Image: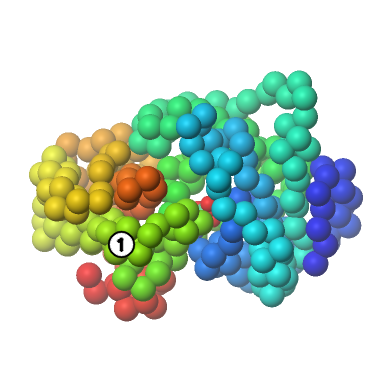
Amino acid sequence: MQVATTVDGMRRLRSQAVGSVGFVPTMGYLHEGHLSLIRRARAENDVVIASIFVNPTQFGPTEDFEKYPRDPQRDLSLLQQERTDIVFMPSPVEMYPEGFATYIDVGGPTEVLEGAHRPGHFRGVATVVLKLFNIVQPTRAYFGQKDAQQLVVIRKMVDDLKLNVEVVPCPTVRETGGLAMSSRNVYLSPDERRAALILFRALSLAERLCRAGERDANKLRDRLHLLMAREPLASVDYISVAHPETLQELETIEVPALVSLAIRIGDTRLIDNFVVGEKRPSPVLAELGLAAR
Ligand code: AMP
């Protein structure tokens, strides 16, 4: 496995790569969710490239950029175990040298949900992802459904700008009990970790209600708000029932619909989602014995 810390170094390694390139961009502090993307990229490409970069421009001024968990040595050894070929690990100043002034604003799907609650977040995401795509020149890029809106935004950018890369969505990997894996789960105390299961419970309830024929999106949102109100450690940023591509809130549920949540558990903000009304359950959930919800 080769590691590049500069743009020039990464470009040199890329120019020597032969065949298809699968790319997995991450912010590091890797867990099984990230590794599932690496494995998928490994299975589908000749060369696998991962990046580790905690991107300052996607964090708001009051967010956790400074304290975001980092452990590059452990990350590198996990990536090596998964037979990653190249890791791109630039510094913030390498990606944003003095005078950097070009940003990507994806319209439409960035204006709601995470975009509405985290101003500038997707501007930072789109800018860094486009820059990484330009440097890495991947054939395919792998993103987790865990960040459903991010996937929509990246796909929109790729389509609008006709970028020559295939975006591959990958299912959310969960811990036993259903909590979606996230680098931020490390912030949770044992009590908060128990309370955080409320996200999966709420999404499971949404799916059950949809299966039972509920089509009134407001009723569905109300039921999820009621459930959240019973968990003293949880406070709601948003509960959304939206169209999976436009992300516009629905009045009447047409399936598939994207049910997504942003919930604060203590000081930690967690997001999760289900696409409800899909014909087949996620194979990852089936593996965990969580498919028969
Ligand atoms: P991050 O390091 O949080 O920026 O995530 C890097 C990539 O891993 C993104 O495409 C995420 O959507 C994906 N990812 C994060 N958590 C999970 C998870 N639990 N299951 C699947 N993919 C994930």
Kindly tell me whether residue 291 is visible in this rendering: yes
Secondary structure found at label 1: helix
Residue drawn at 74 percent across, 51 percent down: 89
Q: Left or right of 176: which side holds 89?
A: right
Location of mark 1 (residue): 191
Dot 1: within a 10 Å radius of its alpha carbon, few (fewer than 14), some, or many (20 or more) residues? few
Tell me where residue 82 appears, x and y as whole percent: 67, 72
| Lateral position of residue 33 relative to residue 134, left or right | left
Q: Amino acid at mark 1?
A: Asp
| Quadrant containing the C terminus in the rendered view | bottom left
Which quadrant of the structure image shows residue 111? top left
Please, is residue 293 above or below residue 72 in the view?
Answer: below
Residue found 80% across the figure and 67% down from its top: 1
Give whichever of 10, 44 is nearer the camera.
10
Please say whether residue 144 is visible from this viewpoint.
Answer: no
Q: Please report the residue visible at 44 percent of the width from the left and 62 percent of the height from the top.
A: 181
Q: Position of residue 33 (x, y in %)?
A: 51, 63
For the rendered model, the colour scheme is: rainbow
In front of the other: 204 or 151: 204
Q: Quadrant of residue 195?
A: bottom left
Spot occupied by residue 162 in the image (x, y as percentages of width and height): 62, 36
Determine whether 223 is above or below 63 in the image: below
Q: Residue 135 at what x, y percent from top left?
A: 77, 43
For image coordinates 54% across by 65% down, the residue present is 31
